[in-house]
Every structure is written in C-alpha cells, then in structure tokens.
Image (tube, helix red, strand yellow):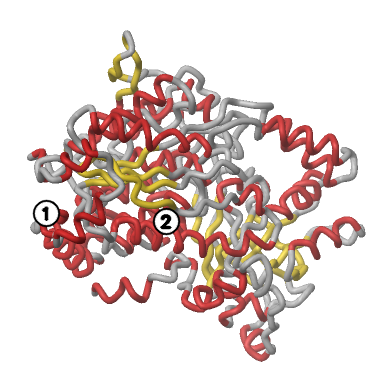
Amino acid sequence: MHPRILEVTERLIARSQETRQRYLQLIRGAASDGPMRGKLQCANFAHGVAACGPEDKNTLRMMNAANVAIVSSYNDMLSAHQPYEHFPNQIKQALRDIGSVGQFAGGVPAMCDGVTQGEPGMEIGIASREVIAMSTAVALSHNMFDAALMLGVCDKIVPGLMMGALRFGHLPMIFIPGGPMVSGISNKEKADVRQRYAEGKATREELLDSEMKSYHGPGTCTFYGTANTNQLLMEVMGLHLPGSSFVNPYTPLRDALTVEAAQQVTRMTMQSGNFMPIGEIVDERSLVNSIVALHATGGSTNHTLHMPAIAQAAGIQLTWQDMADLSEVVPTLTHVYPNGKADINHFQAAGGMSFLIRELLEAGLLHEDVNTVLGRGLSRYTQEPFLEDGKLVWREGPIESLDENILRPVAKAFSPEGGLRVMEGNLGRGVMKVSAVALEHQIVQAPAKVFHDQQDLADAFKAGELECDFVAVMRFQGPRSNGMPELHKMTPFLGVLQDRGFKVALVTDGRMSGASGKIPAAIHVCPEAYSGGPLALVQDGDIIRVDGVKGTLQVLIEPAELAAREPAVGHLDNAVGCGRELFGFMRMAFSSAEQGASAFTSSLETLK
C-alpha cells in the first residue's frame, strides 16, 4: 500500500475509534435479535403482510425465507429515475424464484439540480438529502425486513439513501443503479452553444435544441457530474455488483444485473449463513477507497459535502484534510466532461470500472482487504459483466485502456495528483477542484466584485460591467443562508470572460458541484457569510488572491481594517416560495460545509 493511503486510513481509524465502536455496538446489537418480523406481535405481522398475495404470505411466515425491502427514488419526470418504474416487479419475481419475498417499503423524493438550476427550487437541494435519509428510515422502520435494495442515482439521492441506510446498518443492502442514457451530442458542442448564448451569439431556440439533444432519453445525464460520481463511488465501496454502474437502461444486461442484485442480497442475510450487513461494508477503508476513486476520476466537488455526512452516519469522522492529503498522491486517470471531452459511456467503453480499479489496486492506492456485497476482497471488481446465452457471467476486464485520451494507466496518468485543494486563509476554508482548470488559470489576484445573487452577476455581464480582471464574491449562498444552491448560472459568463483574456475567479460559500469547470472557484467557503464568516466583510475593490496551486484564499488588507468592518447582511426575502418556507427549521440546523452541511451532525455526535 502507498504510505500516504495507510497514513490517512490509520489516523481516520484512530480519530473515529470511539464513535465507530458505538456504531458497531448499535448495529451488532440489532443484528443479534435475528429476523425481526418473527418477534412482531401477531397483529403487527398481519398488518405487514395484509396486502401480499397468498404465496408471499405463506413464505413470510417461514423465518428461513428473506423479506427484502425495496426503497426507490422512482419518478417519471427525471430521466435518471424513470427506468426504476419497472425494477420493483423484476425484483419481486426474481425473489419469488428463489423462495424469498420483496416488498416495496417506501419511496424517497428525487429532485433534479438540472431542472432547478438557477430556480428557487434549487435552494432545497441539500435539504432534500436529509429528507431522503429520513424517508429511508421511515421505509425501514417497520422491522419487517431481512435485507434491502436501494434504488437511486442522482445528486442528493444516493447520499441520502446511504445516510438513512447506515442507520439500519445491521441489514444487508445492495444499491442498484439505473444506468446512463445513451450519448447525445458531444459535451463540447453543448458547452459551446451555452457560451455563445451567453454572449448573445446564439438564439434561445438554438440553445434549447442543443440542450434537448444532450438530455434526450431515459437514464443518468452522461457528463461526469454528481450523479455518475455517486455510481462510481458506490461500486468502489463494494455496494454495487461489479461493473454494473454504467450499463445503459432498458437493455438485457441491465435487467440481468437487477435480477442478480435482488438474489445476491438474500445470500448476505443471517439466514444464508454469509451475513454481511451494510454497516460492516462501509468502514474507514472503504471510505478511503471512495475518496481515492473520487480523486482519480476528477469527481464531483459535492462529495466534499456528501462523504463526510455519509461517514458520520457510520460513526466515522472524515475531514476535508483527509481528502486533500489523499489528493496529493492519487493520480488523475480519467478525462470525462467537464474534465475532458468524453462522456461516461465513452469511459465505460474505454475500460470502465474494471480497468480503473485494477490500476488503483496494483498501484497500492486502494485497500483490497475490504468487505463488499460479494464478500471479502475488492479484486472481484476488476471483472465486468456479460451475457452468455442469456446467462449473466463475469470476465476479467481489459488490462489496457482502449482509449488513453479518456482513461489511462497510473504509469501514464493525466496528472500526478487528484486535483482537490483545501483552500485556506483569512477568508475561511473552502475547496477547489483544479483538475478541470488549466494551470495558467489556477492563480488569480484581482479586485473583488461582490454579489448576493447569480442574476446580479448575469445583469452586470450583460451591461458590460465585467470587462476586467476580477474575483466574483458570491456570498450568502451557504447552507444556513439559503440552503446552499448550486451556482452554475454564472459559469457561461465567467467562461466567456476568461476566454477573452481576463483573469477571473469565483469565491463563494455556495456550491458548484460535479459540473465545476474551467474557472478557478473556491467553493463551500466556511464559516459562511450568514454565520458571520469573513466573506461578509469583503467590499468591492478589495484585492483577493485565489491560489489554487498553494491552496490559499486571501483578501489582501490589514487584519485590523478587516476586523473593524461592519459585516454585510444577507437578503432574507428568499425564505418563502416554492416550498422553501417548509425547510426553515432545517436550515437553522445545518452544520458547516466542512461537516457535510448536514442537519444530523449534532444528533449523530451523541454517539461520541
């Protein structure tokens, strides 16, 4: 193993010893009670099976059969979740075929950042993750189940499912992906049209036509944003079947993998004799593996929020510093949009997960000795699935990349590091994803232009007020202020200005997510402005230095002058409308971005 990987793992284990031990005691105590439905009162049990058919009712009366919960994010407005419409029936039949039962335990909400981008609904995005975690807990609260299958794909859905699932860590669980949509027009062509539209060189009709050719069918969006990062990390953590993350929906292979996942989870139950609950799979080593994979692929910056929150749910204290220290030694092995021109289907065709995991294992960058849904050992994940005469089989994946413009071996890495920086200075702490930012753009020192709203920046661009070097300070966008929306509405404008030769950067207590692109952006800055962070003291014209090479974030004025300033006050008129008023109590409970922007942090700390 690489010494840095061991160092970070060992300190994570040491830091988390008390909370992790409490967590394991909790889930092992729950598991020791055996199949809970056998201990329910007769009336309780009868309620739980009342809607089942006669065959399933009889099966569930036998304690040697497995009852599998199905928790799904299905809705048919969102392309990534639409394929889940058909999964429950497939799963139930697959379970009946082996003498077990599947019950649809509950649905969780799924909102799309792509639809809500720049709209009021975006401000409940992070809150929706917490709602999904709670919905998962409600679904599993009936004590009727021996195992569970989690159906989710996109931005907040998988992290929310994970957070809820880990609080039932005594249950075996498998996450079942839905798969990406087939490729549309190239990501470069899409980005070019967006930028031309921002400059007034393309019509709205041209923009709409381009977007609809990009997002055109069922499945996950094909760029490497948060949704596809979710899938990749779940596989590296051993929570998917090997090679299942990026198989397109509505294909025979996708269906076969769904059936196999349903049957495999029964082999992980206590009744099977090969008990493997999710709380024993997600440990310090698997979390380190997930961060290594995040860096090796230039994944979503949203996971600097989600992974600490997920870790916390398993009693583990993961920090940004852990993530940054791993980034220094993990090479970048993929170029998938926004870090390159290819999409996730091209990544899959070039060698996909099996090649990636083999390379990282052989370089000593992943822990092999971990639990997975197939048992002990990550080496199983160097294989990929195929259909032979209609039967699902796994074969060893390619030992060479089929396209080194997209996917490379460690020996020919795109970069010797993963590209995540912890940014620190007198403006607070944040993160920057530098893997998509050209080296010549990673350091910007320029006067500040302060905004409290994305539309203000767009209006300033259209008025010709941004034709200069500047650092855009977009503040009061943190979790407690307005729920921490993504801020991609600014991206085309800042991209145009950078292309015109201006030095531009962004500093914000908000999010930019997996589509963070070529603009240097210090994001997730905390303390946030709403909670008295230094961003509230910045004024137009202050010189700010954003240094993505050294990881520094400074406003270049005397400390006494900064401290003497009266902090700005954020707008409070954004708390009502589009349901945002329902989440006021949750915003007040959110932790800092570095702690995962979670409403559960304080309650989970009771495990200490």
Q: Look at the picture and state if 283 lies above or below 236.
A: below
Viewer-closest of 10 and 509: 509
Kind of element beneath mark 2:
helix
Position of residue 263 in the picture relative to residue 216 (left or right)? left
The local crowd at label 2, few if under 14, some if 14 to 19, many if 20 or more residues have their Cα within 10 Å, is: many
Quarter of the image that includes the C terminus: bottom left
Kind of element beneath mark 1:
helix
Q: In the figure, residue 118 lies in which quadrant?
A: bottom right
Residue picked out by circle 1: 38
Quarter of the image that includes the N terminus: top left
Q: Farthest residue to the top: give it.
A: 389
Q: Position of residue 276 (x, y in %)?
A: 17, 45
Position of residue 350 in the picture relative to residue 482 (left or right)? left
Residue type for callout 1: Gly
Q: Residue at x 53, y 38 (%)?
A: 82
Q: Are marks 1 and 2 in contact (CB under 8 Å)?
A: no
Label 1 to label 2: alpha-carbon separation: 29 Å
Q: Position of residue 107 (x, y in %)?
A: 43, 51
Q: Look at the picture and state if 315 lies above or below 148.
A: below
Position of residue 287 in the picture relative to residue 490 (left or right)? left
Q: Residue at x 18, y 68 (%)?
A: 22
Q: Look at the picture and state if 317 lies above or below 270.
A: below
Q: Residue at x 15, y 43 (%)?
A: 269
Which of the numbered marks, if any, corresponds to residue 303? none
Residue picked out by circle 2: 160
